[in-house]
Amino acid sequence: MSNSSSLNEFLLLAYADTRELQLLHFSLFLGIYLAALLGNGLIITAVACDHRLHTPMYFFLFNVSLLDLGFISTIVPKSMANSLWNSRAISYSGCAAQVFFFVFFMSAEYWLLTVMAYDRFIAICRPLHYGNLMGSRACVQMAAAAWASGFLYALLHTANTFSIPLCQGNALGQFFCEIPQILKLSCSDADLRELGFIAVSICLVLGCFIFIVVSYVQIFTAVLRIPSEQGRHKAFSMCLPHLAVVSLFVCTGTFAHLKPPSISSPALDLVLAVLYSVVPPAVNPLIYSMRNKELKVALRKLIQVVVVQQQ
């Protein structure tokens, strides 16, 4: 038996034992990672370079893409490296860093998605006050608050998790350092401090989710009152991508952590972890660009500039 003071590494879950399947996992994750880098990188560059996209909605989208890049870069490269080199090990400090950045990027993105719901609510339900409520200074302050809240939340969560004595070995049942898996190694069945922190976290997440739901109920009520079909289509085009991203982000993460124990299994836990930690950063750029004409035009121009410069 060992305690946390003597641990110098953790063992992550291996996807497969055969070399062929390990290389397949590496290739799949590499493809997803490159897609996330390309998609989010294009959105960041397009928003930064096109002055027509210098609006609150695209400013927040710029921040979401930055967080997505950090989110997926926290866990995927290490998993790919382990598969490539046939290893499971991650250092104690590396695991702590992975937990910190994972919680930081995930929580900051969730707060930012909540802010984006508020932005859409003001734009559609209070259009006459939009300029005053969503000025550049207010947008910067809200984005900074989301980043700062995520940092503080991750710092407290990481410190609390790694202060718990661990004496159940060092093998984690996940391909990255996930807090529930680390807690399974604790010396007691449950740590009251961590349970209390999780309870507070659930209340915060639930509060933001209720705010998003209430905002969209009022948004859709206002949209349905718009007399012109073109106006309704434009309003839906602004809101549906954000709602799809929120649904994917919240539903997969919530089900992964709050699913009934009766249906829990290592294979299901692995699939759900991939769905809520790897897939969203890769598909979010596609979701946001599918119904957004301005963004598609900016991306098309950006790609054309890149192609011309390479010729």
Image: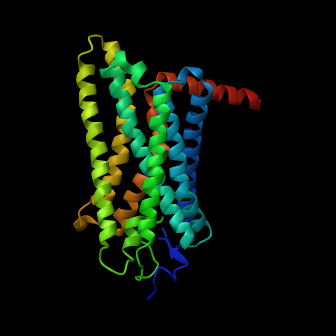
Residue 286 visible from this viewpoint? no
Left or right? Give the position of 260 relative to 310. Answer: left
Q: Residue furthest right?
A: 311
Q: Quadrant of the C terminus?
A: top right
Q: Is residue 132 above or below residue 309?
A: above
Q: Residue at x 30, y 13 (%)?
A: 229
The quadrant of the rendering that contains the N terminus is bottom left
Please state the horizontal and vertical placement of residue 37, each as a whole percent of the image: 58, 45
Give residue 273's quadrant in the image. bottom left
From the viewer's perspective, is 91 left or right of 147?
A: right
Q: How many numbered dots are placed on residues in this image?
A: 0
Q: Residue at x 41, y 65 (%)?
A: 179
- Residue 151 in view here: yes
Where residue 267 appears, x then y in whole percent?
A: 37, 66
Q: Percent from the top left, x then y, of residue 200? A: 30, 56
User: Residue drawn at (51%, 75%), measured in percent from left and top?
Assistant: 10
Depth check: give the residue in front, 251 or 3.
3
Q: Which residue does the image show at 24% across and 20% down from the upper left?
A: 224
Q: In which quarter of the view is residue 84 placed?
A: bottom right
The colour scheme of the drawn protein is rainbow
On screen, 29 above or below 54?
below
